[in-house]
Image (cartoon, rainbow, N blue to C red):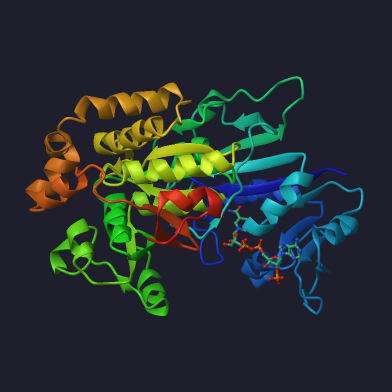
Amino acid sequence: MGLKLIWAQTPDGVIGLDNDLPWRIPEDLARFRRLTSGHPVVMGRRTWESLPEIYRPLPGRDNVVLTHDRGYDAPGAVVATSLDDALAVVGDRDAWVIGGGTLYADALTHADTVEVTIVDRATVGDTFAPVLDERRWVQTAHEPAEGWYSSVTEGTRYRFITYGHRPQSQPAVDPRLQAPHAVRCDWGRAGARAVAAGSDRIAVVVDVLTFTTTVAAACAAGIEVAPFRWHDPRAAGYAERESAVLAGSRSTGGPSLSPGSVRASGLSRLVLPSPNGATTALTIAATGAEVVAGSIRNADAVARWCAARLATDPHLVVGVVPAGEGWPDGAFRPSVEDLWGAGAVIEALRRHGVTDRSVEAEAARQAWLAVADDPVGALRESASGRELSERGWADDVVAAADLDADGVAPVLVDGWFRGRTPEAAGAAGPGGGTVA
Ligand SMILES: NC(=O)c1ccc[n+]([C@@H]2O[C@H](COP(=O)([O-])OP(=O)(O)OC[C@H]3O[C@@H](n4cnc5c(N)ncnc54)[C@H](OP(=O)(O)O)[C@@H]3O)[C@@H](O)[C@H]2O)c1
């Protein structure tokens, strides 16, 4: 029997939102139908329920639905209560696992092939594809040979990648992982998936103007901060349920992405949406990484917390991720202030004995050292700093450049950034350290 997984994802791993697909690409659905027809398809209960009733069960295929509920009724499908049960139903036939996120993660170790459609969209999601470990998986085919296909619906670009097992004779040497260094650095959500994804990673996300600066200031003031995706309509309901305040726009005068507004707020819990930093933090947290919000304001505290974690778990790797900005058309824009913030953390890691870094991490460190004598002046001159100052928020630029003003590491635990003192991080394990 061969077990194959098939999914469609955005470049940063989104596969679903509100138990639905966030896009419609008829060409991808046609390929899905062509590949899976005649074979058993195995799916999680939520994916089964997400199928329109007229397609349930998927025709021309034995449908197997996984649930822990022994009494679950899935008319036209076989119900299995464990992956082993499902594999027993499939027997020695070639079968496809067709979702969703929970099942892909569970079934990956049993699979010999993974078919991935990359959908070239930046979209909000709540379900993510597992990260394929480059030591085990290698691309065996891709279509088209160059560039992208364009869908008949809205011209959405997409392409297909097939992964198979990496032959043992061909060791994993994907240079983009920056292995074997303990400290790595790459940009944005795609870079985060390369250097900071997975349960053996600490992901230090850096968005100096101003998400992680605001988180640093908030956590130092004892405020818990829940990152939220930008323009996600569920943020208000979440804040209400969690007895938290939802940050608004700067002009309202209430808590916002302005660090000063948060420090002065007297709040205990804040839901803080942002387009880059928050979204990157959530995306990378979904891979199992320990996420820390790094900035110029807390570079030393973050580095000390990371160094303490590394001291107790030598398998951990620190991926420092300058979050970057977006151009108006949505394209990714590397922003120099995030490079400086990343470099400040990497330089502090060096001071605390974590010296094995990639050249990419070293480049960020050198970028920071070039401005470390006058971070305020440098930040004021940066494109983002000038933009913020021209909009009347020059104080935020000065606050963001205040090196080591905050003495706690904001660590994402159960969806909330909480201030952790570095000293106890090692002893307490993941997410550990005493609350500041
Ligand atoms: N982009 C794509 O290619 C693609 C493909 C498929 C789905 N999706 C999206 O993915 C999302 C759904 O994914 P999901 O992670 O939320 O749910 P899911 O994996 O479809 O279903 C999860 C449920 O399946 C059952 N289950 C999973 N593993 C099990 C196991 N080993 N033993 C017993 N039961 C097991 C459990 O059901 P019980 O709770 O009943 O116990 C679990 O709650 C939707 O947004 C959907 O649109 C995307």
Residue 218 percent coordinates (x, y): 29, 60
Q: Residue at x 34, y 31 (%)?
A: 347
Q: Residue 411 sits in which quadrant?
A: bottom left
User: Closer to the camera, 155 or 125?
Assistant: 125
Q: Quadrant of the C terminus?
A: bottom left
Would residue 129 appear left or right of 342 to someone viewing this image? right
User: Closer to the camera, 102 or 243?
Assistant: 243
Q: Quadrant of the N terminus?
A: top right
Residue 134 percent coordinates (x, y): 63, 32
Q: Is residue 45 above or below residue 172?
A: below
Q: Is residue 256 above or below residue 329?
A: below
Would residue 41 appear left or right of 17 to someone viewing this image? right
Q: Residue at x 32, y 62 (%)?
A: 272
Q: Is residue 115 above or below residue 123?
A: above
User: Closer to the camera, 166 or 241?
Assistant: 241
Residue 316 percent coordinates (x, y): 56, 39
Q: Residue at x 18, y 69 (%)?
A: 254
Q: Residue at x 41, y 76 (%)?
A: 242
Q: Is residue 128 visible?
A: yes
- How many numbered marks appear? 0
Q: Is residue 119 visible?
A: no
User: Closer to the camera, 66 or 249?
Assistant: 249
Residue 84 percent coordinates (x, y): 85, 57
Would residue 278 appear left or right of 142 to someone viewing this image? left
Q: Which quadrant of the render holds ligand 1?
A: bottom right
